[in-house]
Amino acid sequence: LYVLLDAMQSRLGCVIVCGITRDHAVLELFEKRVKSRLQNHHVAFNRPTKVDIIQFFQDRFRLCGEDLGSASERLMQETSSRKRPREDDEDTREIYIKAHAKAFEACIADERVAKMLDDSVSCGRSMRWFCRVAQRCACEINEDDPLLRPAHLLEAFRAQEPNSCRAWREALRSLPPAEKALVIAYLKLERIGKQYCLENAAHALARLGQASSQEAFDEDRLLEAQTLLLDKSMVLLSAEARNRRDAHVLRFAPCRLAPALDVDDLWLALRGDDLGCTTTLRQWALNHV
């Protein structure tokens, strides 16, 4: 190590040594001549404290009039004139912003949320873990209940726990073939990051059916599978189609996997052949992303 570090001091040297450790006192273990050459740049990634997490949630869920205004403009551009909501004035936006801020303060002050935060920080959860909690919590806010509630945060915390991932793996493993194939198709579309619906999944599964008759599912079976997944809350429809279940809506309404499902965890389970999929379905999912 000393020879390598010494060679780095040369003008002709093109070597960079990057060391990663969990021990902040690791430099004390080296002899002086090595230690003197390891004093260039130190970057420490400390676990977040409860104050850091609360500040992070405040930043993530903070609203202002400009945010709502730009969101309204995007909504007007993405929806047809028949489906466009009525225009809200600035006073209505300010009322909602104040109500949202008050609801957030009530969430943080809730004893159950505070205990969950304490337990998560004491377990050494990473900031990435709390980012996923915030993402799942935000997905629970909808037009019917547009304010953040303690129940949303608590459910997001529970959904992110390791045991919940194991439970979702078991639930997916026990699904009937059509439902399982549909969830796997949604899983692929979810990783692409584009909006999708049952029609997109059916089109993708049609190519799978050409390769294996065992994995061929007609339209009626996929519609039935979509209905059952909605009943199990594994799949969610868009807010405007949530209360409708006719065939046209089931096929073309935008949908997504429930926020409680960890897409990354399920994808790893699929790669590890831990979801009970047939070989054809698993290879199709992994080889055609």
Image: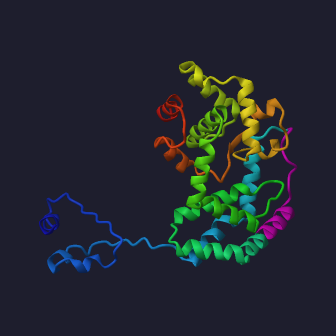
- Display coloring: rainbow
Q: Residue at x 64, y 62 (%)?
A: 158
Identify the image quadrant of the N terminus.
bottom left
Residue 67 falls in image quadrant: bottom right
- Magenta span of residues: 82-100
Count of marks overlaid on the render: 0
**245 left or right of 197 in image:** right
Nearest the camera: 50 or 234?
234
**52 left or right of 42 in image:** right
Nearest the camera: 198 or 74?
198
Q: Where is residue 256 in the image (x, y as percent from the top left)?
A: 68, 43
Q: In this view, does 166 lie above or below 186?
A: below
Q: Position of residue 198 (x, y in %)?
A: 70, 33
Q: Position of residue 10 (x, y in %)?
A: 13, 64
Q: Residue at x 52, y 73 (%)?
A: 48
Nearest the camera: 259 or 52?
259
**92 left or right of 182 in image:** right
Whether residue 93 appears in magenta in the rendering, the answer is: yes
Q: In this view, does 145 lie above or below 249?
A: below
Whether residue 212 appears in magenta in the rendering, the answer is: no
Residue 104 falls in image quadrant: bottom right
Q: Where is residue 280 in the image (x, y as percent from the top left)?
A: 51, 28
